[in-house]
Amino acid sequence: MKIATNLIHSASGARMHNMDFQQRLVIDTKKMEWLPSPANGVWRKPLERQAKETGHTTSIVRYAAGSSFAPHSHPMGEEIFVLEGVFSDETGDFGPGTYIRNPPGSQHAPFSKQGCTIFVKLNQFLAQDSQQISIDTNKAPWLAGIGGLQVMPLHEFGHQHTALVKWPAGERFQPHHHWGGEEILVLSGQFQDEFGQYPTGTWLRSPHLSEHFPFVEQETVIWVKTGHLPQQGD
């Protein structure tokens, strides 16, 4: 699988990474190297980044056991899905499968006693999206979706929707397009469409009005977000 990447420089000279939202991206995060963060023991795999330590950012982040990050604020929000281990801050401990939303203006001092790996999206909220959310997806109910799909809604605001989707083995979905784009992280199994195969750990970003015909051969669970990417010219 080819890893799509795009490095450009902003007018201020800050390094940008995968910020062309008209570009379809497919990244096998398990093949990426861990890069150090400013915090000792905290490592990152950057997927998209507006600037080195600020702005729009999506990453896989790993905390070594006993590591912590300095207290910081989230000017335009923070969205987290815990992949492994236990992620913690002053509000509590969050195990694998926890979905967290910290709204614009929130702040915390995160750490992990035993170590953890999380999927993180920073500074991507709409200004009015102020709901604080913590959902243990191991306990939340699955709802019937189209065909054999099961859906676990996580968040909705305006035209943006975030959910887990469970695909039974052999399921084929109808061809469709993505108004406002689509972003997927494959949590288990292997997701597929007419363009390729995407094993566990693959991150996909498809632009506004892109189309595909997804299917699976084995049971597969994905984190999916739609309606949040800029339209052409935005």
Image (cartoon, grey):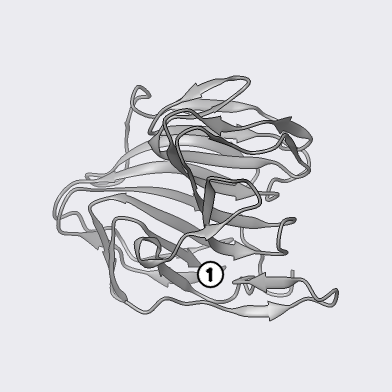
Three-letter amino acid code of the residue under disc 1? Leu
The residue sitting at 73% across, 46% down in the picture is 126
Q: Position of residue 93 (x, y in %)?
A: 49, 22
The residue sitting at 59% across, 41% down in the picture is 79
The quadrant of the picture occupied by the N terminus is: bottom left
123 and 61: which is toward the camera: 61
Q: Position of residue 173 (x, y in %)?
A: 28, 58
The quadrant of the picture occupied by the C terminus is: bottom right
The residue sitting at 77% across, 71% down in the picture is 14
Crowd rating for badge 1 (residues with CA inside 10 Å; few <14, some 14–19, many 20+):
some
Q: Is residue 171 above or below residue 4?
A: above
**Image check: 14 left or right of 32?**
right
**Image check: 214 left or right of 108?**
left
Work out whether residue 160 can be spotted: yes
Hey, which quadrant is residue 215 in on the image?
Answer: bottom left
Name the residue that disc number 1 marks: 209
Q: Position of residue 48 (x, y in %)?
A: 59, 64
Work out whether residue 226 can be spotted: no
Q: Is residue 197 above or below residue 130?
A: below
Q: Position of residue 111 (x, y in %)?
A: 56, 32
Say which element carries label 1: loop
Q: Is residue 152 above or below residue 213?
A: above
**Image check: 33 left or right of 30?**
right
Q: Is residue 5 above or below residue 219?
A: below
The number of numbered discs placed on residues in the rendered structure image is 1
